[in-house]
Image (cartoon, grey):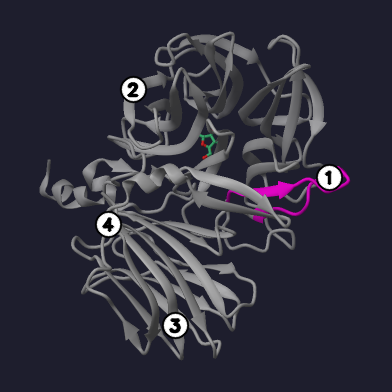
Amino acid sequence: MSNKAIAAAHWRPAFHLSPAQGLMNDPNGLIHFAGHYHVFFQWNPHACTHGAKSWGHASSPNLLDWTIHPPALEPGDWYDSHGCYSGSAWVMDGRLWLIYTGNVREGTERKSYQCLAVSDDGIHFAKQGPTLHHPPAGYTTHFRDPRLWQNEDGFHMVIGAQRNNGSGTILHFHSQTLQNWTLCGELLPDNKHGYMCECPELFTLQNRQLLLFCPQGPEGESWPYPNANASCYCSMDQNDSGFAKPQLLDYGPDFYAAQTMQDLDGKRIMWGWMGRPEQPHTPSVAAGWTHCLSVPRVLDWHDGQLSQQPHPALQALRGDCLQLANQAISGQWQHPGVHGECCELDITLSTTDGSACHIMLRQGPHCHTRLSWLPAMEELELDTRHSGTGDGRISRAPLPASTRMHLRLLLDRSSLEIFANDGKVVLSACLFPDRGAEGISLLADGSAHIEHLAFWPIK
Ligand code: FRU
């Protein structure tokens, strides 16, 4: 390893899935099969750039201990010569099936085939070739990311699509046999979702139908968010009359292409790609890898809102707990036991005068990451501009008016995941702080209190 690579090695996450080398993006084909959770992911093993993607593969019996397997799919056949793009998995007749988009480029022309692969052992996959050869009339070859599920009436899938007029939508297909597919219709009939909708998924949570997808380049009134490309969700109207306005799944700068599955207890769990399509500068490239996945998050639906929480399995990673209660923050607050690059912080703050309270993370002499609770603005603000050598920015998330706020933070060397108000507001960011920048402190502009704090180093 070069000196630069050795210097960059300390950003390797301890408990997030990251690529041994090259670039990782979307989680794919999340499934439980033959006693293991399987997480596949978009992977360019050859360079830290987007390119002809393989399906990387990891499996775990418990969501904690991961084994990395050889790639499940590699590009190179006539129907996937320029990439085995995103897709999904299901189990049928005791075998593990994958469906993915075969990306083919011929000069400036693109072709998209929806292809199948199957495995008996969950490790070695045999490609079966295309099951759907081209998009239906009226749609361009921006047609990818099949998410398939099986019902009593056969197979269904949703696929991200672009209309011939250049607007993005999602198409729903049905087939009895996995061969002739019938187009059932568009899930997003209007023109408000940018030029393409990537990575769609449809599922039911607490009797509510939810649609996850990633609109690319949406703008105007229907998109009141700064992110040019973002993972979002819509819920089906109570009367089944259509999907409500999209909401961001995550307000941070680095979360995209989420996919879900059900765990063994039936909980709906979601992973996302901690990265973004705009290709930010990630200094871990000096060590030969870039991006990671989020932790698995449990989804819940209450009072018309989605919430996300780190999967409870992750609690097994916690070291000894430090607990504190009722601490006034006069100016600055610090505690010798509260610092780290791999840790979890659970904190309830209160304020009586509506003034701001700031949590400084990964603090060192030359860097810090600032998370500010701004009760007067009803906002949470994450500032990663001084986090280190990555591409920082300010991200803002709306909070309901309140004199209290609960936060759960997960820090893992180059990642930060923030779950506010029981996971109703979530922000994720990649950080590249200086080595040894482990400080955590709180600053109050006025009168603020720590009602309760729990801190765990992560083992
Ligand atoms: C989303 C995406 C998908 C595509 C894959 C290619 O990040 O662009 O639409 O299948 O990544 O890696």
Closer to viewer: mark 2 or mark 3: 3
- The one nearer the camera, 315 or 56, is 315
Quick one: label 3 or label 1, which is nearer the N terminus? 1
For numbered disc 1, what is the local secondary structure?
Answer: loop
Q: Which residue is mark 4?
A: 320
Quick one: label 4 or label 2, which is nearer the N terminus? 2
User: Looking at the image, which residue is at 54% across and 45% down?
Assistant: 298
Quick one: label 2 or label 3, which is nearer the N terminus? 2
Quick one: label 4 or label 1, which is nearer the N terminus? 1
Residue 155 occupies quadrant: top right
User: Residues under labels 3 and 1: Cα distance?
Assistant: 44 Å
Check disc 1 and give the amino acid type: Gly
Please state if 278 lies on the left or on the right of 328 as rendered: right
Find residue 79 and report its horizontal and vertical position in percent: 54, 15
Residue 108 occupies quadrant: top right
Disc 2 residue: CB within 8 Å of ligand 1: no
Residues in magenta?
230-247
Magenta segment main secondary structure: loop
User: Residues under labels 2 and 1: Cα distance?
Assistant: 41 Å
Residue 296, disc: none
- The one nearer the camera, 317 or 55, is 317
Q: Which residue is mark 2?
A: 69
Check disc 2 and give the amino acid type: His
Check disc 3 and give the amino acid type: His
User: Looking at the image, which residue is at 64% across and 77% down?
Assistant: 401
Quick one: label 2 or label 1, which is nearer the N terminus? 2
Rendered view: 185 above or below 395:
above
For numbered disc 4, what is the local secondary structure?
Answer: loop
